[in-house]
Amino acid sequence: MLLSVLILIPMMMAIAVGLLPLNPTQIKTLALWVSGVLFGLTLVLMAKFDPSIAGLQFVENLPWISELGLDYRLGVDGLSLPLLVLNGLLTLIAVYITDPAVMRPKFYYAMIFLLNSGVVGAFLAHNLLLFFLFYELELIPLYLLISIWGGARRGYAGTKFLIYTAISGILVLAGFLGLTWLSGSTSFDYNPLLSQGLPMGSQLLLLGAIVVGFGIKIPLFPFHTWLPDAHVEASTPISVLLAGVLLKLGTYGLLRFGLELFPEAWVVAAPWFASWAVVSVLFGALAAIAQTDMKKMVAYSSIGHMGFVLLAAAAATPVAMVGALFQMIAHGLISGLLFVLVGLVYKKTGTRDITVLRGLLNPERGLPIVGSLMVLAVMASAGMPGMVGFISEFLIFRGSFAAYPTQTLLCLVGTGLTAVYFLLLVNRTFFGRLPEQFYDLPVVTWGERFPGFALAILIVVLGLNPNWLSRWTEVTTIGLVQDSAIVIQQQNDLRETAFVIDALP
């Protein structure tokens, strides 16, 4: 029942905060305690998890609407477990850094917890329709969090996000319905063998719908345009959740419902996916270089870094798959840290414009601690050794080079461009002479610094000790590739047998 508890507690909390007679301070205190408990439960789940088992653990399976093939089936494996822990951590940080004077606090925290419930349910669901329900559940609270508590153009950004992600859900649902209908199955329970026996044309069509659907969520070029607007207008806590967790629903779905459900079609389409990854990586990097808004620059960097996951998935080698999971966690931690720091800069200076900011690393009048953490964050994002970003990118490039050497080398160029645009950000914003208008900046308290230090420590610790993460996911991710390879080999053997039989006199 532990998996259901992780879904139900935030869902019930979303209701409770609207009914309890609490003032804003009490509401935030309660939200902090509950989000802390949820994060603690994910750690309990990790402690009880057996990393030597590739399949699902803690499975919960209850009949629900059997006539529609919809059952309440939950499970966790090495692919979803690290993402659950990341979601718990970043939700706790988002609640912690929320302004105590946030307007309509009851509704705000209710939407945070409803969002958390939807994300957790999507990572745990092993029924296609159940996954879709949770996948859509997180859409409404995030839309409201952007549209109500965002910036000046929040209505435009929220509506754009809603339209894009609604289309994403429609495409994913169409792929699920088509797969179940064409395979003749009466249930939507997750089954990697559903696509076996389908004509290759049908497989490619269904796979295309699912990949494009999740590609919008990731997002990949050219379906990315909603992301910069959403990040710029969203408040800092929501940007942390959006970049750190919500984008991972797309990459998770790509691996779980793309690669694993359509292994044969994936092999056929993989070269195109690798080329798509190159375009997304290079576009994201070049677009980031052109930005003057710190938050928009970080947003475009996410497009490039999520493209690395697509490259790894296209290669589908054991090393690349471990790297793909590493990249999801690394990006969640690094982007979370970057948005926390950008939020602090904006809070203290009133601007994010890198053409205006200067000298913030000044030890007396500037923001030296924030600047130091920013230097660490951009080094991690650029893949400097000793940090988790280096581990993820090294594994992806090492695992993908044999399959797609040209595409891998081009993505390496994207890594170099990452160093360029973040060097521009740090050099223009934190070095040089501090302008007089910033001489009396408000002090950054230790409470405000704490989330940044926590994320920075994790980035370094996992970079120096990658086994602390890989041991939980390695068996599952390698098993995912091996299972797909077995299915492909079985199909090839059947074709060869049929050819021999046809050739007999």
Image (tube, rainbow, N blue to C red):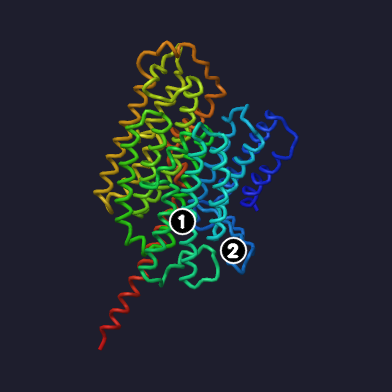
Amino acid type at circle 1 is: Arg
Q: Is 17 displayed left or right of 361 in the figure?
A: right
- Name the quadrant of the C terminus: bottom left
Tell me how far mark 1 sits from mark 2, CA to CA. Answer: 18 Å
Is residue 438 positioned above or below 195 on the image? above
The residue wearing badge 2 is 70
Residue 431 at what x, y percent from top left? 36, 18
Instruction: Residue 39: give x, y in percent of width and height.
Output: 59, 40
Q: Residue furthest bottom?
A: 505
Q: Residue at x 48, y 62 (%)?
A: 176
* Residue nearest the viewer, comparing 462 with 94: 94
Whether residue 96 is situated above or below residue 436 in the rendered picture: below
Q: Residue at x 41, y 50 (%)?
A: 215
Q: Quadrant of residue 200?
A: bottom left
Residue at mark 1: 256
Secondary structure beneath disc 1?
A: helix
